[in-house]
Image: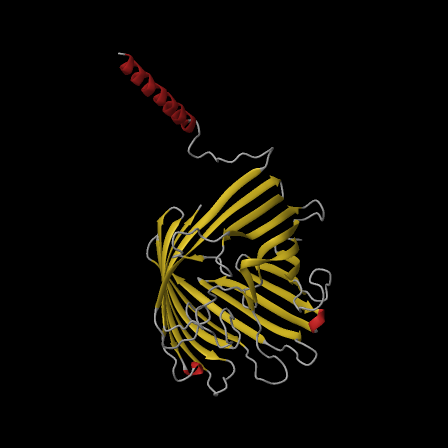
């Protein structure tokens, strides 16, 4: 009898804890934010899990479109963010992400080991208000993603830079910004890394956008990059605009560069882009053309020099996965011109698809006198599996032209991506 009594009491003891645990969880409404902060501070947690599978063929380890074995692999990115609003107009933001060396991903297959460390991607403070100048203005300081215009010249939204940004909106139509960016400490390699400022690569930016009306806007930006020890002063003046009418959306941009690369060389590159799309629901037709100058091997550097992250800027294969006509990846319009035709199809609320064709030509011939880069066809399909969960498939084929030599081969890239945002 004592055995049975002890067993019954033991079961009741365990069940009492289970009931208590259930009661505790049941008291928290399902929509309640499980974050507590002092005073009126509001904390928002977020993040992303992204897994990608890759297949590529005829892309060498040196990223040239030549005959080689195919490759297949998976990579993954983890992001965690904290967005803290501590008072009206006062905010702090921190985001960390997985790091695989120089990339923002780690590759699967490390045999019973942990993924690589999380590192800071963003960390900044933002203050906005109208008390100082009588109209909305603000100050943003820290490590943050940055880009200019339509991103032909400068796009560091992948990993970001250390910057101080002052902005103001004197009217509802006018936005003005002033930036100072610390691109590189001891860029020249001369002197003491932390005590000298003449060896740094610093950037200074002034920009303005003006909204003409609800359908059109114009913008202008000026960038000055300087490293005194190298007599380096790269300058870029860019303009961009957008307009919409009768279902047609237009966009255009132009950049011109000047300054000194060193005592004996000057910068003289330029680029231009014009695009349009026409909506015929559920189909959108797109056309665009772009050109960036190359270096003609005279005393000056006439190439359109870009500062871009390792992202896909237009084509999936050329420029993103294969060395461009500028000699490496992620060079944008440097020594490249293209014509693009594309179509988007919204098959349903959850499914969207697109196809793009590109004809590509080098702005300056290579050493063999060739300028035919080739052509490329890219396709994409994206499906919303559930709220904040999407699956995307990208495919691209690049038919390399004579610019890559007589042994050039067609290069293929297939990529599928599962992304969860929270």
Asked which colour scheme the image uses, the reply is secondary structure
Q: Quadrant of residue 259?
A: bottom right
Q: Nearest the camera: 182 or 87?
A: 182
Which residue is pictured at 61% across the width and 55% down the height? 173
- Please tell me whether residue 79 is drawn above or below residue 60 in the rendered image: above
Question: As drawn, is 56 to the left or to the right of 366?
Answer: left
Question: As drawn, is 192 to the left or to the right of 291?
Answer: right
Q: Residue furthest bottom?
A: 369
Which residue is pictured at 47% across the width and 74% down the height? 324
Q: Nearest the camera: 321 or 378?
A: 321
Q: Position of residue 254 (x, y in %)?
A: 57, 71
- Please state, as top left, top right, bottom left or bottom right, where the C terminus lies in the image: top left
Q: Position of residue 146 (x, y in %)?
A: 58, 59
Residue 384: in sight, yes or no? yes
Which residue is pictured at 46% across the width and 75% down the height? 338
Q: Position of residue 74 (x, y in %)?
A: 38, 59
């Amino acid at each position: 009898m004592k055995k049975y009594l002890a067993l019954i009491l033991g079961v009741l003891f365990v069940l009492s804890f289970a009931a208590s645990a259930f009661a505790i969880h049941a008291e928290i409404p399902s929509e309640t934010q499980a974050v507590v902060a002092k005073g009126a501070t509001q904390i928002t947690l977020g993040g992303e899990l992204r897994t990608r599978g890759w297949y590529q063929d005829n892309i060498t380890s040196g990223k040239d479109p030549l005959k080689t074995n195919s490759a297949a692999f998976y990579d993954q990115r983890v992001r965690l963010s904290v967005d803290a609003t501590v008072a009206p107009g006062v905010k702090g933001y921190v985001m960390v992400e997985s790091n695989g060396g120089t990339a923002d991903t780690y590759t699967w297959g490390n045999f019973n080991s942990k993924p690589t460390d999380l590192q800071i991607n963003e960390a900044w403070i933002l203050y906005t208000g109208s008390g100082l100048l009588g109209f909305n203005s603000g100050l943003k300081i820290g490590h943050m993603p940055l880009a200019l215009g339509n991103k032909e010249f400068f796009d560091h939204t992948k990993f970001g830079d250390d910057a101080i940004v002052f902005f103001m909106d004197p009217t509802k139509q006018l936005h003005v910004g002033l930036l100072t960016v610390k691109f590189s400490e001891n860029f020249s390699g001369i002197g003491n890394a932390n005590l000298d400022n003449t060896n740094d690569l610093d950037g200074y930016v002034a920009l303005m956008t003006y909204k003409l009306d609800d359908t059109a806007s114009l913008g202008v930006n000026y960038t000055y990059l300087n490293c005194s020890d190298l007599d380096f002063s790269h300058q870029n003046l860019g303009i961009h605009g957008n307009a919409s009418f009768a279902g047609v959306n237009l966009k255009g941009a132009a950049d011109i560069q000047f300054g000194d690369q060193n005592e004996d060389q000057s910068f003289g590159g330029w680029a231009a882009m014009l695009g349009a799309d026409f909506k015929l629901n559920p189909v959108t037709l797109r056309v665009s053309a772009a050109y960036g100058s190359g270096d003609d091997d005279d005393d000056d550097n006439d190439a359109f020099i870009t500062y871009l992250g390792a992202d896909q800027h237009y084509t999936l294969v050329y420029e993103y996965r294969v060395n461009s006509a500028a000699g490496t990846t992620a060079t944008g319009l440097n020594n490249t011109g293209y014509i693009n035709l594309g179509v988007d199809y919204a098959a349903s609320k959850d499914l969207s698809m697109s196809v793009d064709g590109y004809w590509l030509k080098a702005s300056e011939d290579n050493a063999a006198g060739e300028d035919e880069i080739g052509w490329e066809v890219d396709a994409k399909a994206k499906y919303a599996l559930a709220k904040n969960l999407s699956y995307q498939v990208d495919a691209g084929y690049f038919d390399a032209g004579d610019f890559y030599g007589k042994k050039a081969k067609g290069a293929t890239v297939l990529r599928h991506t599962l992304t969860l945002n929270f």
